[in-house]
Image (cartoon, rainbow, N blue to C red):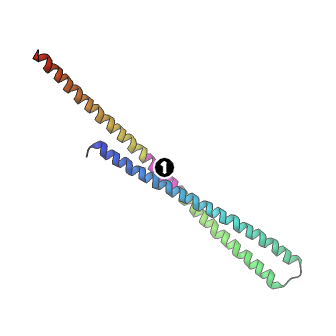
């Protein structure tokens, strides 16, 4: 196995690592969007329940309904807090995935350049050898005259 093949294999490996890192970024982005969607839904539930609570406070209803709405609002607020923690963790995961992707992309480009450099170096060496052979052949033909 020559150097060009080695660098090519390393470049392929770096390409795969960059692809995996990109998939991690996409997955982290998707998770963050999903959490944002859940947050919007919970805010809608919170607003709806708060409106219903105000209606119950304004009318003469049972105390159990008032307590039920307050309890439900408390659960929704608790879920919003849990969701905020999850979003923070998802943002950190996304940032790490983006850093990993950047590093993998840099490594991919580096390996690609090294592969091209080694291929060009090998091509120059082959041309030099070929030129020497042609020169030797020309000298040998000249000497045969």
Image check: 102 left or right of 127? right
Q: Quadrant of residue 69?
A: bottom right
Q: Residue furthest right?
A: 59
Q: Residue at x 38, y 47 (%)?
A: 11
- Residue 140 against residue 117 in the figure, above or below: above
Question: Circle 1: is it few (<14), some (14-19), or many (20+) Cα within 10 Å?
Answer: some
Quick check: can you spot residue 87? Answer: yes
- Residue 121 against residue 52 in the figure, above or below: above
Q: Residue at x 70, y 64 (%)?
A: 40
Q: Position of residue 25 (x, y in %)?
A: 53, 56
Q: Position of residue 87 (x, y in %)?
A: 61, 63
Q: Secondary structure at mark 1?
A: helix
Q: Position of residue 36 (x, y in %)?
A: 65, 62
Q: Is residue 133 magenta?
A: no
- Residue 52 against residue 2 in the figure, above or below: below
How many labels were placed on the picture?
Answer: 1
Q: Position of residue 8 (x, y in %)?
A: 34, 45
Q: Main secondary structure of the magenta part?
A: helix
Image check: 100 left or right of 49? left
Q: Residue at x 74, y 74 (%)?
A: 73
Residue that numbered label 1 is attached to: 102
Quick check: can you spot residue 96? Answer: no
- Find the magenta span and give its range: 95-106
Q: Quadrant of residue 74?
A: bottom right
């Amino acid at each position: 196995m020559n150097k060009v093949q080695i660098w090519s294999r390393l470049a392929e490996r770096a390409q795969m690592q960059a692809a995996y890192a990109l998939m991690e970024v996409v997955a982290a982005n998707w998770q963050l969007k999903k959490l944002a969607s859940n947050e919007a839904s919970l805010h809608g539930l919170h607003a709806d329940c708060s409106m219903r609570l105000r209606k119950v406070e304004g009318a003469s209803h049972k105390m159990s309904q008032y307590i039920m709405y307050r309890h439900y609002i408390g659960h929704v607020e608790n879920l919003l807090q849990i969701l905020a923690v999850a979003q923070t963790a998802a943002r950190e995961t996304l940032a790490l995935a983006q850093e990993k992707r950047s590093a993998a992309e840099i490594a991919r480009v580096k390996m690609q350049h090294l592969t091209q450099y080694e291929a060009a170096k090998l091509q120059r060496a082959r041309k030099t050898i070929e030129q020497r052979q042609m020169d030797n052949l020309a000298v040998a033909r000249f000497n045969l005259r």
